[in-house]
């Protein structure tokens, strides 16, 4: 009998233990939707020696920029030590450290990719520390003035980027992360080779397609000096697709697509927001035509980014263009390649959009950036979160942004005027390579487009709806001739239509 | 009277010593069982219990944008819907690729390893060298091997390019990156790195076969083929079937080679065209834990009878031989 009771008790204990772990503690504090700024008492904050521990993504930009910014910060505030730890697999580190709490995790600031909001907010993983989200609510910080300047972070940031970082919460919109990099991604071209062949930079997609015809002619006339139009890694074509799509449909339509609704309320998704995206189809048509004409390109369409870079920077390969990002110069330099004779061109305007709007100038100029996928955030339980926030007010200052740009060649996701201001104030344009000067030109003359995963539970929740959901990227689909632009678009529409109710239920909306 | 007392005392003493011995035995058994039981509870019961609970949970998004947990069987319905999706069906494709890796992987690897073990046993020319060469991949980190493999097949800078140039070939296709050939690359990598362990096991099993048996085959003038298939294979059948059963367990967890070869290959995070069931679970680990828990239960329900069936069939094929 005793044994039976013992077994029963043990089983009950095992059953109850996980349930208690799921139960939230009472009284968490939610986002306040507060528009007042953070107030820092610097005298008190820096009265005693303190250490700010940072995990930083160590990839294309590396982390010398943060070391330099941190050194400047330490100079200004002598009692602070900034301890920087580079992490190449930072997403895994965030997953492993963020939920641990202050006893086991001493990281105060993460310069990472975007955090998993479903996990850190919707699941209320911060309840243990008296708040809903394990990520510190940075809404007030957005409204705080940048260190040494008369402008707030929110005012300085590109509005679309801020919107992409915004999460709908119980008390309205709130921000739990800030963007920390926003360089231009798009079509890079070999300036020397363009000049040698007498080609001009295309203004529209029709010009770009015509350029492929010119290349063919050139190759016939110069058999000993043949050039290849493109070399690429498949996902990087997505940058151009996004820009063409935004040019045709406008950023509102793109945002609606990521929000999965046209009425602004993510809790009432509308399939039309996904299926009625003519701009996407027009963008696919251009890409299909481009890739149908480059069968003889070196390396084909299945290269890794490193391989594509190696071919593009190899003068003997004579490749004209390559879809790439702002990290190209630093990444190729790290691999011993010279990326200095390459420039990014303003993404050629979609000819269908030119037709729609009546003239080239009427089509908005966009550039694709990874602004929304580079997030800096603070654990809610950090004991040094006041310093972490204070450090961020310095990080968004012109001085720190100039260091960032000088070291990485990338920019902050500021409004174009603010980018221009810090570049000019710190005379960065004087030392810029051709590549960086072209980046600067594009960044200050274009509006930003980017991936927006936070805007709908359909995307960050269990449905995990991706931008290109049918399991093959457009570039791969068109290059392998598995799909045409129309059949690819139809397949996407069929995916949304066939799976709509399942996706809604999977994401927890219905 | 005295005698009776003495007898009773003796019996009591005997009882006491028996009790003490039993107590010691129980204590010893408890202590011996403590570690495995603790391990089982901590690393199997608790995580799996949580996981089983997830399978019966549904997170509904409230107007407050928080997840509100409900008890439901809906995750099993989601599993079915994932399997029967009309478009963009990743799970079905993963099951197909898992079968591909399992059937071809074992279909090539096991007979090849067996043959190799036999040749090494027969002490063919340079057998010591071959033993090291084929076992080497097992003692080198798989990550290092993946780097070597990727560098060899790199279509721009790889050794394959140089070999191709020497043979006068044109451009080299991207064996690992191309969606049409990616699964073959993963299979090739798995075969290359998977030889060593089985080789060791088979070598051990063949080495244990009594010398008298092998001598008698020699005296009877048995050829090598007959010796292998009619003597060695039946004699090491229990080892062979154990390896096959163990590999069945890996059917759902095959993921490492895909991750090692897929990483960074296409400049961004997207679902691999050659993903397995293990890869599907890995890819959706953070967004679909409830669905994956239900999927796990479904696969367990399916695989347990399969494992028993295979075990029964393997035992039927050849009876266990003691020597």
Image (spheres, coloured by chain):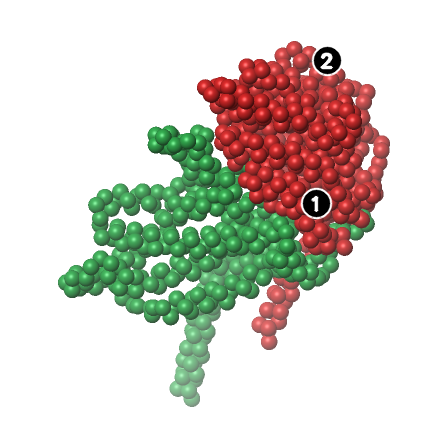
Q: Residue furthest bottom?
A: B1
* Residue A165 seen in the current view: no
- Rendered location of residue A230, percent (x, y): 56, 27
Determine the residue positioned at 39% across, 32% down.
Answer: B169
Identify the residue position indicated by label 1 in the image.
A459
Residue A427 — which label?
A: none
State yes or no: discs 2 and 1 in contact (Cβ < 8 Å).
no
- Is B312 in front, or is B164? B164
User: Chain A, which colour?
Assistant: red
Identify the residue position indicated by label 2 in the image.
A425
User: Chain B, which colour?
Assistant: green
Residue under mark 2: which chain is it in?
A: A
Mark 2–mark 1 Cα distance, whole angstroms, equals: 40 Å
Residue under mark 1: which chain is it in?
A: A
The image shows residue B16, relative to residue A83, as above or below, that is below
State which quarter of the image contains the C terminus of chain A: bottom right
- Is A301 in front, or is A429? A301
- Mark 2 or mark 1: which comes first in sequence? 2
- Rendered location of residue A4, percent (x, y): 59, 73
- Rendered location of residue B304, percent (x, y): 51, 65
- Is A310 in front, or is A48? A310
């Amino acid at each position: 009998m005793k044994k039976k009771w013992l077994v029963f008790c043990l089983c009950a204990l095992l059953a109850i233990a996980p349930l208690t772990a799921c139960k939230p503690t009472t009284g968490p504090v939610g986002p306040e939707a507060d528009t007042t700024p953070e107030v820092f008492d610097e005298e008190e904050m820096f009265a005693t020696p303190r250490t700010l521990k940072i995990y930083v993504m160590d990839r294309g930009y590396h982390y010398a920029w943060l070391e330099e910014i941190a050194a400047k910060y330490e100079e200004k505030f002598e009692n602070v030590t900034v301890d920087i730890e580079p992490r190449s697999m930072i997403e895994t580190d965030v997953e492993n450290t963020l939920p641990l709490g202050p006893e086991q995790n001493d990281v105060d600031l993460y310069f990472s990719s975007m955090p998993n909001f479903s996990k850190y907010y919707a699941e209320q993983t911060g309840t243990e520390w008296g708040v809903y989200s394990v990520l510190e609510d940075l809404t007030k910080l957005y409204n705080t003035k940048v260190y040494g300047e008369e402008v707030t972070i929110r005012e300085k940031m590109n509005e679309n980027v801020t919107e992409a970082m915004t999460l709908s919460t119980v008390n309205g919109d709130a921000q739990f992360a800030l963007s920390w990099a926003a360089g231009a991604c798009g079509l890079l071209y070999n300036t020397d080779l363009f000049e040698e062949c007498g080609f001009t930079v295309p203004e529209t997609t029709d010009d770009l397609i015509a350029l492929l015809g010119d290349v063919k002619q050139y190759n016939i006339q110069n058999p000993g000096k043949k050039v290849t139009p493109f070399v690429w890694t498949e996902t990087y074509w997505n940058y151009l697709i996004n820009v063409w799509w935004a040019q045709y449909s406008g950023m509102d339509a793109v945002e609606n697509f990521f929000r999965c609704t046209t009425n602004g309320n993510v809790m009432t998704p509308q399939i039309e927001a996904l299926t009625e995206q003519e701009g996407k189809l027009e963008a696919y048509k251009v890409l299909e035509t481009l890739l149908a004409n480059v069968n003889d390109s070196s390396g084909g369409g299945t290269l890794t980014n490193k391989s594509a870079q190696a071919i593009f920077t190899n003068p003997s390969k004579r490749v004209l263009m390559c879809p790439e990002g702002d990290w190209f110069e630093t990444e190729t330099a790290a691999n011993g390649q010279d990326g200095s004779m390459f420039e990014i061109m303003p993404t050629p305007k979609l000819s269908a959009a030119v037709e729609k709007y009546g003239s080239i100038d009427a089509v908005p100029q966009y550039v694709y950036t990874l602004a929304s996928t580079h997030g800096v955030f603070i654990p809610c339980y950090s004991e040094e979160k006041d310093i972490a926030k204070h450090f961020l007010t310095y990080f968004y200052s012109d001085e720190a942004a100039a260091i960032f740009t000088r070291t990485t060649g990338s920019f902050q996701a500021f409004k174009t005027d603010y980018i221009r201001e810090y570049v000019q104030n710190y005379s960065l344009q004087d030392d810029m390579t051709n590549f960086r000067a072209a980046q600067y030109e594009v960044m200050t003359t274009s509006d930003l487009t980017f991936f927006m995963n936070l805007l709908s539970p359909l995307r960050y929740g269990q449905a995990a709806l991706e931008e290109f959901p049918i399991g093959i990227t457009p570039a791969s689909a068109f290059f392998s001739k598995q799909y045409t632009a129309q059949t690819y678009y139809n397949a996407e529409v069929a995916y949304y239509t066939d799976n709509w109710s399942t996706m809604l239920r999977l994401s927890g909306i219905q | 009277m005295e005698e009776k007392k003495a007898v009773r005392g003796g019996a009591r003493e005997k009882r006491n010593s028996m009790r003490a011995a039993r107590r010691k035995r129980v204590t010893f058994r408890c202590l011996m069982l403590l570690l495995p039981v603790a391990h089982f509870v901590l690393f199997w019961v608790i995580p799996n219990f949580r996981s089983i609970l997830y399978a019966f949970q549904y997170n509904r998004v409230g107007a407050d944008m928080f997840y509100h947990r409900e008890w439901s069987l809906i995750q099993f319905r989601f599993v079915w819907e994932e399997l029967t999706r009309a478009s963009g069906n990743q799970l079905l494709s993963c099951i197909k690729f898992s079968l591909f890796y399992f059937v071809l992987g074992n279909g090539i690897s096991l007979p090849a390893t067996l043959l190799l073990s036999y040749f090494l046993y027969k002490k063919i020319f340079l057998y010591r060298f071959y033993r090291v060469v084929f076992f080497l991949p097992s003692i080198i980190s798989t990550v290092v091997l993946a780097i070597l493999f990727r560098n060899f097949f790199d279509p721009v800078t790889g050794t394959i390019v140089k070999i191709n140039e020497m043979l006068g070939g044109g451009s080299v296709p991207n064996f690992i990156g191309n969606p049409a050939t990616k699964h073959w690359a993963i299979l090739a990598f798995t075969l290359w790195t998977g030889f060593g362990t089985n080789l060791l096991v088979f070598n051990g099993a063949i080495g244990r076969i009594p010398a008298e048996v092998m001598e008698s085959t020699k005296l009877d003038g048995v050829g090598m083929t007959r010796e292998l298939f009619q003597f060695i294979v039946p004699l090491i059948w229990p080892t062979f079937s154990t390896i096959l059963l163990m590999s069945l367990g890996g059917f759902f967890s095959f993921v490492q080679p895909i991750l090692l070869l897929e990483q960074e290959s296409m400049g961004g995070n997207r679902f691999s065209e050659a993903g397995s069931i293990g890869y599907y679970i890995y890819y959706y680990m953070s967004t679909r834990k409830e669905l994956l828990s239900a999927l796990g239960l479904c696969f367990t329900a399916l695989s347990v009878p399969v494992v028993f069936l295979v075990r029964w069939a393997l035992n039927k094929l050849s009876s266990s031989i003691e020597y």
